[in-house]
Image (cartoon, rainbow, N blue to C red):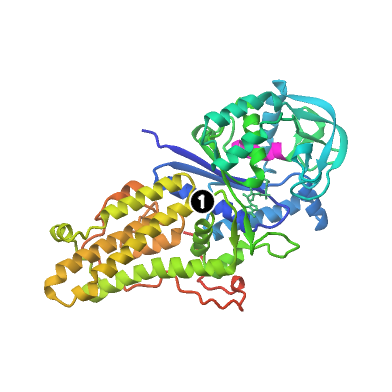
């Protein structure tokens, strides 16, 4: 049987400014989803990259007195360098200035032009220079661009247009008949309600007299293509469309991760472009909300644009990944503050998980000199000491949530199991049993169940905290040599920890952080330098 395939992407980020917390979130979310799918037996391909053409980049380069290409090279490198720092394992990093990408953009433009879905026309419209696009009246707020808060300029020029209107009914039908096409549902509804009004054709060219930093139209050398037409194509050009092996294997098993700001290009332009070019439609969009910082939208003028490198250096990569995945309900907005990350680290990581780990290991050291004893099946049954059905429940709940990108619920399922294990210790009181020799077989059974429970936890946290997962697994003597993770099927087998294995004395997984807010935590490293796994 051939292995199931899954292709994940992030948006390709604009190179007009350096990466911030929001970009880091999307890349980490896609990485978590990829690692989870691998655990679920899929072969995956994970793509990210940078979007380098258009007016925004020209302006940013001018401000730095450099060329767009030199500027794009510099900022793209920052996005590339961020990935290993966040322990994000992409398979490819695409840049829209890559020659192969440019060729594919031209191929697709020619294909659509030849089929008659691109036409030339004179047009007068409302143009927002910040967004680099024309707006329809009904998309504006108080006559202003909803993103930039400025009134668009009336521009009259001849341009090429893509006949999107022709595909409106088809798209509505596609969204309605594929309930998972846009998840979560609120964004699906948002798009369907937008599509109740007639869709205008999309202006897909910019005259070179106004902008030269773009891909020249294959059918008119005086124009470059609109930056979104160029950018969206990255998702297939990176796979080597039309003949590449990766394209054949991974398209259209695609789920695109995007935030709510770019659902229109992804949910309207992109499926219609694919349809018009005769390319199968991608599987769907995973749409998340926005991170605010201390309650406000991140902005340079407020000075709250949060640098993910500083946060990672301050708190450690796994704590940062955990926080982002735990704190945001996928689809809704979330808020980042130093206080909330510190409190999550102390409560969830240091207390719940870290203490459980060290509690179990210390008891095993104290009572059995670290040697893993086995469980006595009769005692286990008679005294109802098994934790295996709680573990199965956790695995099931985890899987159901992670499949839908409900990362906070997936984590919740693991933490529910951690809490069951903590209560199991409190109610079985190993310290009391240890006082009587006759109780030793019961104690052995309890500790074996707890150690097995730790095994399950160590496997399930892998997509979110790969480093901690590995650290726990090394301690438990179950490090996977080649893959670095256990599949969900493998995790489910209860009783894998080897009897006779000697567990070392516990090493703290997550040191508590004191809440001294007088120190700028982001800039005060707390952890050892991070080495990607
Ligand atoms: N270049 C386009 C995307 C083209 S994809 C074919 C673009 N780039 S961007 O640099 O502006 O990135 C937007 C994306 O960055 C969002 O969709 C989201 O994934 C991420 N985020 C940017 N700010 C964010 C927050 N404040 N919070 C969460 N994610 C955010 O649009």
At 49% from the left edge and 62% from the top edge, which residue is drawn?
318
**Horizontal and vertical percent for residue 112?**
69, 25
Front-most of 44 and 400? 400
Task: Between residue 108 and residue 357, name the one nearer to us.
Answer: 357
- State the quadrant of the N terminus: top left
Give x and y (percent) for residue 237: 62, 37
Query: In the orientation shown, which residue stands out farthest toward the left?
Result: 438
What percent of the width, then of the height, locates residue 356?
35, 68
Residue tagged by mark 1? 31
The answer, for residue 97, to whether it is visible in the render is yes
Q: Is residue 268 magenta?
A: no
Horizontal side, residue 518 vs residue 363: left or right = right
Q: Mark 1: which secondary structure? A: helix
Q: Is 224 placed left or right of 419 in the picture?
A: right
**Label 1 residue near ligand 1, CB within 8 Å:** no
Tell me: residue 263, above or below residue 281: below
In percent of the image, x 77 and y 29: which residue is there?
A: 161
The residue drawn where x is 55% and y is 41% is 185
Residue 1 falls left or right of residue 35: left
Question: In the rendered structure, which segment of residues is drawn in magenta?
Answer: 228-237
What secondary structure is the magenta-colored segment mainly?
helix
- Within 10 Å of disc 1 (Cα), the crowding (few <14, some 14-19, many 20+) is many
Quarter assignment of residue 266: top right
The verdict on residue 230 being magenta is yes
Residue 340 is left or right of residue 130, and the answer is left
């Amino acid at each position: 049987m051939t292995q199931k395939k899954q292709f994940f992407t992030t948006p390709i980020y604009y190179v007009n400014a350096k990466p911030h917390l929001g970009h880091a979130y999307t890349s980490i979310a896609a990485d978590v989803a990829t690692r989870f799918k691998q655990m679920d037996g899929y072969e995956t391909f994970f793509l990210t990259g940078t979007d380098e053409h258009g007016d925004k980049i020209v302006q940013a380069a001018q401000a730095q007195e450099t060329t767009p290409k030199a500027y794009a090279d510099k900022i793209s490198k920052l996005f590339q360098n961020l990935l290993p720092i966040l322990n994000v394992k992409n398979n490819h990093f695409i840049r829209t200035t890559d020659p192969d990408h440019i060729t594919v953009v031209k191929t697709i433009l020619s294909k659509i032009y030849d089929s008659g879905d691109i036409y030339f026309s004179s047009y007068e419209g409302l143009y927002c220079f910040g967004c680099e696009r024309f707006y329809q009246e009904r998309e504006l707020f108080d006559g202003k661009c909803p993103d930039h808060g400025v009134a668009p300029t009336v521009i009259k020029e001849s341009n090429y247009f893509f006949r999107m209107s022709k595909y409106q009914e088809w798209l509505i039908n596609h969204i309605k008949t594929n309930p998972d096409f846009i998840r979560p549902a609120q964004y699906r509804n948002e798009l369907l309600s937008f599509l109740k009004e007639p869709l205008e054709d999309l202006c897909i060219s910019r005259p070179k007299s106004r902008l030269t930093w773009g891909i020249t139209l294959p059918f008119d050398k005086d124009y470059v293509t609109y930056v979104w037409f160029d950018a969206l194509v990255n998702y297939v050009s990176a796979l080597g469309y039309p003949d590449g092996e990766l394209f054949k294997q991974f398209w259209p098993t695609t789920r695109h991760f995007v935030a709510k700001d770019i659902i229109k290009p992804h949910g309207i332009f992109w499926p219609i472009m694919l349809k018009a070019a005769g390319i199968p439609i991608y599987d769907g969009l995973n749409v998340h909300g926005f991170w605010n910082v201390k309650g406000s939208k991140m902005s340079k003028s407020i000075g709250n644009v949060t640098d993910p490198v500083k946060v990672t250096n301050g708190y450690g990569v796994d704590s940062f990944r955990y926080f982002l995945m735990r704190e945001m309900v996928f689809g809704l907005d979330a808020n980042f503050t130093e206080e909330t990350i510190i409190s999550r680290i102390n409560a969830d990581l240091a207390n719940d998980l870290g203490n459980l780990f060290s509690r179990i290991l210390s008891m095993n050291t104290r009572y059995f000199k670290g040697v893993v004893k086995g469980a006595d099946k009769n005692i286990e049954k008679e005294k109802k000491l098994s934790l295996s059905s709680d573990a199965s429940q956790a695995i099931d709940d985890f899987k159901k949530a992670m499949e839908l990108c409900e990362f906070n619920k997936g984590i919740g399922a693991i933490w529910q199991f951690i809490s069951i294990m903590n209560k199991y210790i409190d109610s079985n009181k190993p310290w009391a049993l240890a006082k009587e020799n006759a109780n030793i077989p019961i104690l052995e059974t309890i500790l074996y169940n707890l150690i097995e429970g730790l095994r399950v936890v160590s496997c399930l946290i892998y997509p979110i905290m790969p480093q901690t997962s590995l650290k726990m697994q090394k301690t438990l003597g179950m490090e996977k040599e080649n893959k670095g993770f256990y599949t969900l099927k493998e995790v489910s087998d209860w009783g894998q920890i080897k009897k006779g294995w000697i567990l070392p004395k516990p090493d703290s997984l997550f040191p508590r952080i004191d809440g001294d807010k007088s120190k700028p935590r982001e800039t005060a490293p707390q952890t050892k330098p991070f080495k990607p796994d």
